[in-house]
Structures are given as structure tokens and as C-alpha cells.
Image (spheres, rainbow, N blue to C red):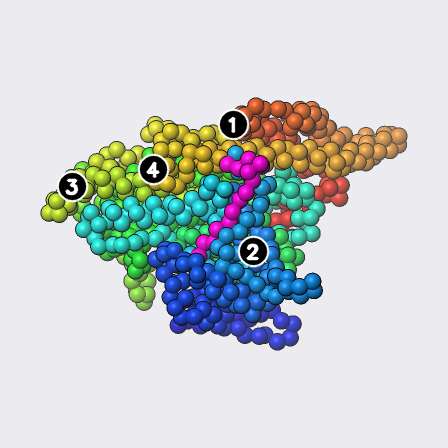
């Protein structure tokens, strides 16, 4: 086994820690279970975790007690049911492990019933009408398939969150339901095709991008503090045009930060692996090793939390907003997704000869069909006010969904569709022209970075996610649409005789490609030509969240989710309503912040600079000297300033405008508020370039992007 050594930052000694020894030490892992549970109970727990068996009531107390003992040995005093409400963040409410035994005495206690179910009240989370306040009970239910852990003296128990009638009030319940749906559909189809497979599970590796900036500068900008993004800021003197940040060497401050992040994540059993500088100044990425979707989801939430917490130890702030700065790249989260058998065999592995791998090609065809038929849902799954600033902004995939398959797979599928034999003409050697180097094999797919949904070797990479998104929704959608297509294939193939199966599969792939090949696109997804071409092909372009969300509850989507028991109609309506409301509220808060900063900080600063200029002009004039330069600057400031002032008046009226429906409010935000805010921003940024640095009341883009890392 590979041993990694890391150094803790201690003043005088460099203490070595061996990661093998402490990886996962804060997780109630299978080895911790083995130590703390009687053997028979441990075996039953394994059945619960691996085979999805029910936890017998009588052993729940034993497990709870062991968990408590283990956690207290790690210094924990409290426990919390950790859940992911529909806000997408994680929620926790801490309870101490104590039970009074007399007026002045307590014993430490934690029972099975407390482990299995919690009633956190939590009535203030948005429920989209699933919970009226008079019946506000919300329950948390232990999810034994995601491991409990200790953090900051508290035992965290991953849970699901539902209402009195069992409706999902969280992000995780639908995700687990969709895993079940995909498992059921895939096992059925694969067995019909003649493979003896009992269980499949989905796997995800989310690559997390983020910005790091100096804490002091962050605190001076209300826009960053309140909204996570800068609402003003003239372009810096240098952006990312030299591509010199990407993969660059790390400064000591950032290196120290990343070491601490890794250490914290490793203790929590998160497979943090790859870290590097990203394209924009101050931008970075952390990629974990993939794992099962449920765990990857929880670990990504933990990763975002640790990234933010550890930053404060280094005088930094980690920004997870999708577009903190105008003019440089925003941050995304590439969701690498696949599914494998119980034994870990990846179903999306094409093998050495993809053209002969009929199982792979069938599943691929199903995915192509699913992505084409449910473009709207994939777009919706990544929709948010912040992400709208990224998608289609020449740095992230456009708001149009398409699939990239790479040269070889595209050629194979084209040959199948045409009924031709595929002749492999692709040269798989990478020719470097250096005789002393051993030959390097070429991967079968290249990486088209502009594609929103790209096949990358043995998995799909869904690239439209924004950096701060909870990954459960996109994966719920992916799992469900693929479950649907696999089910349709299974229905069609059910009665096919064994000896006719290959022929039937080829015919099915052919038919699927004929009907759905419009979704396959290998060119530059950032180009304007693609937008036109996509329109010609009839692909959807849902530009804003307000455009996309109302399709959530289209009849075909309601039907899909109900069929696979992923969302009931009321659960889906609730989500649509919450997301629409959230979108409007986010934009409204941004508008208020903009107005506040203008009135309280920016306008007064401009006035004082204008006064200085006017004073100089006056003084010069009284000495009989002309002041053409000062007059010019004053005019340059004053012309846009008058416009800003008028627009600001309008913005302040619009902020309070009443709308009748959630959909209307969202459209109003997208079509009225945001464009006006953009105009105000551009004018203000223009003024900024004419005002002295000393008088400008905010740290500017040069300060934030270039002095942060010092
Ligand atoms: P790149 O930056 O080139 O996209 P990385 O190696 O940084 O690639 O990230 C790829 C991600 O995909 C990693 O998190 C990796 O663990 C994950 N991954 C690899 N194989 C699978 C798989 N079968 N299922 C899900 N994720 C996978
Ligand atoms: Mg990637």
C-alpha cells in the first residue's frame, strides 16, 4: 500500500503523520464498528449497509450505544441528525448525550430510537407547501448507508428529512429513491440481455472549484459578504489572458491551506486527491476519488464546509459562488457519473474493443435517448441565480444540453446506424517524435471541454453544475432518466429469444440513434454557430432559471418521477415552487445590496472625489489658469453618474414591486431586475476607472485578485 506522508505546520518541528494511520479516524467506519459492536450485531449492521436489509429494532439500542461510546472516546459531547433540507445546505441541531438521573446528576445516554428517528421541528425550512405550520412535524430518519462521523465534539448522523406523511423535505431522499430506481431498471435489463447481475450502484466524483481571497478585503465588500459575488468592480489590469494561473505552482499560504484541508478531509474519510490552480486568478480545484453517489454527495457537502472553515485559519475566505467576479471564469463542479456492479465492474467501461461491447453500446444508447428526451430536466437540475451567470458565458457549457462522445464512439455509432461494419482507422499511438521515449497510448476519447455532458473514457462528466450546488438533484435526475430508458429497453426486449438478442439489440441501438442523434455534438459548444445549429436541431435553450424551472412539472416529467417513485406530484410542485421563490429572493437581495452600496458608499465617495476636482478647478480658475483635464474627468464621471442616479431610483421602486405568482416573480427578476442591475453596474464600473484609488470605497478587482495571495 502506498504510504503518503504529510507535514503539519508546526513552528519548530516538522511532525510527520502517516495518512494510512489516520485516514477516516473520525468516521464510525466498518473497522470502528468491528471494535465497538458485538460480532453478531456487526454482521447485522453490514447486512443493513451492504444489502439494504432492515435494522432489527432490538439491535438499534446496541448500535446507538456503541456509536455513542466511540464518539465520546473521540471527545464528543453531543450528537446531531445531519440532513440536507431543500435549501441545499446541510442542517444540524445538537443534543447532548445526557439524561438526568436526579436533581443534580446525569448519565450519558443515547438510545436506538434517538438514532433511528429525530424530530427536529425545523419548521422554518422551505417546504413548498408540503408542510403547513399547523402540521409542522418534520422527521429525520437515520441513513445507515452513509457513515456517521465526529466533528467538533459532535457525533454527526447522516439522516433523511421528511414530513408527517412521509413526503421528502430534503435533497437526499429523492436521491436514494433514484438510486433504487436505476438499480431496479438496470438489473432487469441486464438480466434480460443475459448477464447475471444482482445489483448495481451509481458512482460519482465531483470536482470542486473555488476561489480564495483575503479575509480583510472580503469583509470590506458588502456584496461579497451578503450575496457571495461582486456586484461592482471594473476589470483588473490583468485577467486570465496569459493562462498563467492554471496549474501554476502554489504559494506557501495556499499550500498550507490545502494541506490543512486535506488533513481535515482525510480524517473524515473523504478521498481528497487532486488539487491545483484553476484558470482565473485566485481560483483552485479539489477533486476527490469517486465513490458511491450517496457518500459522494455527503462528502461533497463536507468538503465545501471544510474548504470554508479552514480558510479562516489562514486569513482567507473561500468563495463557492458560481460567479464571484465579472470578466474572469466562474466556478463549476464537474459531476463525473457512472454505475457499476456489486463487484465494482464499471458498466460504462467500453473495454479494448468498444464496437464489440454490445452491453456498453446498449447502455450508451439508453443514456443518449434519456439526455435528449429530458434536456429540460438536466438544465433544471443545475438552475440557480448564480449559475445563470456562468452558463453560456464562454467559459462554461452553454445552457443548451448536448452530448460529446469522442471520435471513436461517434464513428462506431454512425456505422451501426448506417448498418455498416465499423472499420477502426484511429491511430492510438501518441507520436511525440522522440526516439528515446516509450510509446504512449492515446485514450479513446479526447476531452471536449466545451461540452455540457461528455463521455470521458468510462464515465460521463456533467459539467453544467455550479460550484456551490448540492449534487443530489443532478444525480437524482440522471439516475431517473436513465432508469426510465433502461426500463423502456427492457420492456422492448423482454420477449426476445436468447439467440435473437444481439440482432434485437443492434436494431434497438439503430432506432435509438436515428431518433436521438441530434443530441450528439462534437464541436465547440461555446460558439455562436452551435447556438444556431442547436436551434435548427430543435434542442432546447433555456437561458435563465426563470425560463427553465416551470418545465419541472410538465406532464411528461411528473409522469416520469411518479413512475419511478422518485418524486410524487406534490413533492415536485414543492421543489419547483421553492426554487422559483429562491431565485427571485436571491436577485431581490442582490438588488437591495446594490442599492445600499450605491447610496451609502459609492455615491458619497464619488461626490467627495468630484468635490476635490471642483475645488482644484476653482482654485486654478481663481489664479487665472484653465483646468481642462480636471474638467474632462469631472464630465467623464458626471455623465454616467446622472444615469446611475436615475436607474437607482427605478431599481429602488422595482425592488418592492408586488408580483402575484412565483413564476411571475422569477420572470420579473430575470427580465427586469437583472438587466437593470447590469446597466447600473457597467456605468458604475466606468465611473470607478475615473475615480482615484484613494477615494474608491471598496477593495477593487486588482486588490482582490492580485493582493489576496500575498
Ligand atoms: P479531469 O479534471 O480531467 O476531468 P480528474 O481526474 O480531475 O479529471 O477528475 C475525474 C473525476 O472523475 C475524479 O473525481 C475521479 O475519481 C472521477 N471518476 C473516475 N472514474 C469514475 C467512475 N467510474 N465513476 C464516477 N466518477 C469517476
Ligand atoms: Mg473534469
Q: Mark 4 and 1 residues: CB-CB less than 8 Å, in contact?
A: no
Please tell me whether mark 4 sits on a helix, a strand or a loop.
Answer: helix
Q: How many marks?
A: 4
Residue at coordinates 68% horizontally, 42% vertically from top-left? 222
Indicate which disc residue 80 carries: 2
Give the mark, 2 or 3, whose residue is nearer the N terminus: 2
Q: Nearer the viewer, mark 2 or mark 3?
A: 2
Alpha carbon distance from label 4 to label 1? 26 Å
Residue position for label 4:
563
446 with respect to 419 (left or right): right
Q: Which residue is mark 1?
A: 663
What secondary structure is found at the residue carrying circle 2?
strand
Above or below 287: residue 450: above
Residue at (55, 49) in percent of width and height: 119
On the image, numbered disc 3 is attached to which residue?
495
Spatial CA span between label 2 and label 4: 34 Å
Mark 3 or mark 4, earlier in chain: 3
Residue 273's place in the image compared with 162, above or below, is below
Amino acid at each position: 500500500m502506498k504510504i503518503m506522508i504529510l507535514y503539519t505546520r508546526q513552528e519548530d518541528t516538522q511532525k510527520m503523520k502517516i495518512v494510512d494511520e489516520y485516514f477516516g479516524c473520525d468516521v464510525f467506519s466498518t473497522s470502528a464498528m468491528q471494535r465497538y459492536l458485538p460480532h453478531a450485531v456487526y454482521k447485522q449492521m453490514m447486512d443493513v449497509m451492504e444489502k439494504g436489509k432492515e435494522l432489527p429494532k432490538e439491535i438499534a439500542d446496541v448500535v446507538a450505544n456503541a456509536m455513542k461510546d466511540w464518539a465520546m472516546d473521540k471527545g464528543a459531547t453531543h450528537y446531531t441528525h445531519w440532513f440536507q433540507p431543500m435549501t441545499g445546505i446541510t442542517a444540524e441541531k445538537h443534543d447532548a448525550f445526557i439524561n438526568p438521573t436526579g436533581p443534580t446528576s446525569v448519565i450519558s445516554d443515547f438510545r436506538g430510537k434517538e438514532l433511528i428517528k429525530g424530530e427536529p421541528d425545523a419548521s422554518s425550512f422551505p417546504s413548498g407547501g408540503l408542510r403547513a405550520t399547523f402540521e409542522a412535524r418534520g422527521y429525520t430518519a437515520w441513513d445507515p448507508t452513509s457513515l456517521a462521523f465526529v466533528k467538533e465534539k459532535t457525533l454527526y448522523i447522516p439522516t433523511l428529512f421528511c414530513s408527517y406523511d412521509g413526503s421528502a423535505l430534503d435533497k437526499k431522499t429523492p436521491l436514494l429513491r433514484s438510486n433504487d430506481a436505476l438499480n431496479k431498471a438496470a438489473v432487469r435489463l441486464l438480466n434480460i440481455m443475459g448477464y447475471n447481475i444482482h445489483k448495481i450502484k451509481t458512482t460519482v466524483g465531483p470536482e470542486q472549484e473555488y476561489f480564495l481571497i483575503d479575509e480583510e478585503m472580503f469583509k470590506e465588500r458588502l456584496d461579497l459578504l451578503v450575496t457571495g459575488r461582486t456586484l461592482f468592480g471594473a476589470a483588473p489590469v490583468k485577467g486570465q489572458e496569459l493562462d498563467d494561473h492554471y496549474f501554476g505552482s502554489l504559494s506557501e499560504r495556499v499550500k498550507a491551506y490545502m494541506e490543512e484541508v486535506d488533513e481535515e478531509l482525510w480524517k473524515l474519510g473523504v478521498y481528497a486527491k487532486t488539487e491545483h490552480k484553476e484558470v482565473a486568478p485566485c481560483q483552485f480545484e479539489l477533486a476527490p476519488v469517486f465513490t458511491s453517489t450517496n457518500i459522494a454527495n455527503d462528502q461533497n457537502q463536507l468538503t465545501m464546509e471544510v474548504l470554508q472553515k479552514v480558510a479562516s485559519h489562514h486569513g482567507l475566505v473561500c468563495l463557492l459562488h458560481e460567479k464571484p467576479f465579472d470578466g474572469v471564469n466562474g466556478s463549476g463542479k464537474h459531476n463525473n457519473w457512472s454505475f457499476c456492479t456489486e463487484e465494482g465492474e464499471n458498466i460504462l467501461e467500453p473495454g479494448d474493443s468498444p464496437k464489440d461491447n454490445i452491453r456498453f453500446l446498449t447502455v450508451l444508447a439508453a443514456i443518449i435517448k434519456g439526455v435528449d428526451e429530458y434536456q429540460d430536466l438536466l438544465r433544471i437540475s443545475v438552475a440557480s441565480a448564480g449559475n445563470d451567470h456562468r452558463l453560456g458565458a464562454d467559459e462554461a457549457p452553454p445552457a443548451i444540453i448536448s452530448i460529446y462522445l469522442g471520435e471513436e464512439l461517434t464513428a462506431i455509432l454512425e456505422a451501426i446506424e448506417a448498418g455498416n461494419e465499423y472499420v477502426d482507422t484511429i491511430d492510438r499511438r501518441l507520436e511525440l517524435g522522440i526516439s528515446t521515449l516509450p510509446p504512449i497510448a492515446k485514450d479513446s476519447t479526447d476531452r471536449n471541454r466545451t461540452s455540457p455532458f461528455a463521455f470521458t473514457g468510462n464515465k460521463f462528466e456533467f459539467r453544467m453544475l455550479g460550484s456551490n450546488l448540492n449534487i443530489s438533484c443532478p444525480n437524482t435526475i440522471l439516475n431517473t432518466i436513465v432508469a426510465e430508458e433502461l426500463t423502456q429497453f427492457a420492456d422492448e426486449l423482454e420477449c426476445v429469444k436468447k439467440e435473437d438478442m444481439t440482432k434485437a439489440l443492434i436494431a434497438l441501438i439503430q432506432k435509438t440513434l436515428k431518433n436521438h442523434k441530434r443530441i450528439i455534438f462534437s464541436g465547440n459548444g461555446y460558439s455562436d454557430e452551435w447556438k444556431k445549429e442547436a436551434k435548427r436541431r430543435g434542442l432546447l435553450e433555456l437561458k435563465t432559471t426563470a425560463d427553465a424551472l416551470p418545465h419541472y412539472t410538465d406532464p411528461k416529467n411528473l409522469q416520469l418521477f411518479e413512475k419511478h417513485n422518485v418524486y410524487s406530484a406534490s413533492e415536485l410542485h414543492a421543489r419547483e415552487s421553492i426554487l422559483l421563490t429562491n431565485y427571485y429572493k436571491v436577485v431581490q437581495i442582490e438588488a437591495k445590496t446594490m442599492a445600499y452600496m450605491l447610496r451609502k458608499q459609492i455615491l458619497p465617495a464619488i461626490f467627495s472625489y468630484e468635490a476635490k476636482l471642483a475645488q482644484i478647478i476653482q482654485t486654478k480658475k481663481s489664479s487665472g489658469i484653465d483646468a481642462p483635464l480636471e474638467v474632462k474627468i469631472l464630465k467623464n464621471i458626471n455623465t454616467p453618474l446622472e444615469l446611475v442616479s436615475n436607474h437607482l431610483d427605478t431599481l429602488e421602486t422595482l425592488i418592492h414591486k408586488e408580483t402575484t405568482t412565483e413564476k411571475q416573480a422569477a420572470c420579473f427578476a430575470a427580465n427586469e431586475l437583472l438587466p437593470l442591475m447590469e446597466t447600473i453596474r457597467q456605468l458604475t464600473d466606468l465611473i470607478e476607472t475615473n475615480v482615484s484609488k484613494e477615494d474608491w470605497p471598496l477593495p477593487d478587482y486588482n486588490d482582490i485578485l492580485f493582493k489576496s495571495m500575498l
